[in-house]
Amino acid sequence: MNSKLQDLKKRYRGEWLAVSIPGKDHVGRTAKLLAHHIDKKTLHQLLREKKIKDAYITFAGVALKPGYAVMFYEVQG
């Protein structure tokens, strides 16, 4: 069953999601949920058990705790 990626993120909030995005659907982000788990290592183990090699993995929640920030630095060489 395919769903919108945003809908899956709302339904499985606080969990790691492994999805496949059929074709090149970069606008609507239609996704098929392959597996989900609160622990990222366990999610990868589930994918190996199911012999799934191609999956988009994302976290359905806040990436940073309040008060933290991220800065990116590009190294050119």
Image: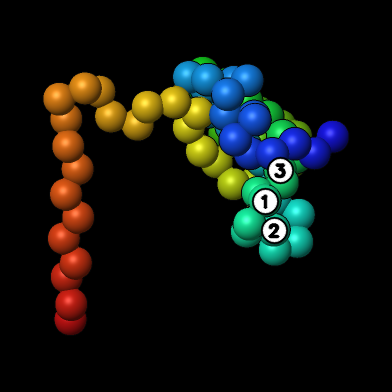
Whole-angstrom CA distance, mark 2 to mark 3, is 9 Å
Q: Which mark is residue 55?
A: none
Q: Position of residue 54 (x, y in %)?
A: 66, 51
Label 1 crowd (10 A; few <14 / some 14-19 / many >=20): few
Q: Earlier in the sequence, mark 2 or mark 3?
A: 2
Q: Is residue 74 above or below residue 49?
A: below
At x 17%, y 37%, the residue is 69
Q: Is residue 54 above or below residue 15?
A: below
Q: Are marks 2 and 1 in contact (CB under 8 Å)?
A: yes
Which of these two is toward me, 62 or 76?
62
Q: Position of residue 52 (x, y in %)?
A: 71, 43
> What is the three-letter code of the residue carrying label 3?
Ala
Is 23 left or right of 36, judged from the image as shown? Answer: right
The residue tagged 1 is 28
Residue 72: in sight, yes or no? yes
Q: Nearer the viewer, mark 2 or mark 1?
A: 1
The residue tagged 3 is 31
The residue tagged 2 is 25
Q: Nearer the viewer, mark 3 or mark 1?
A: 1
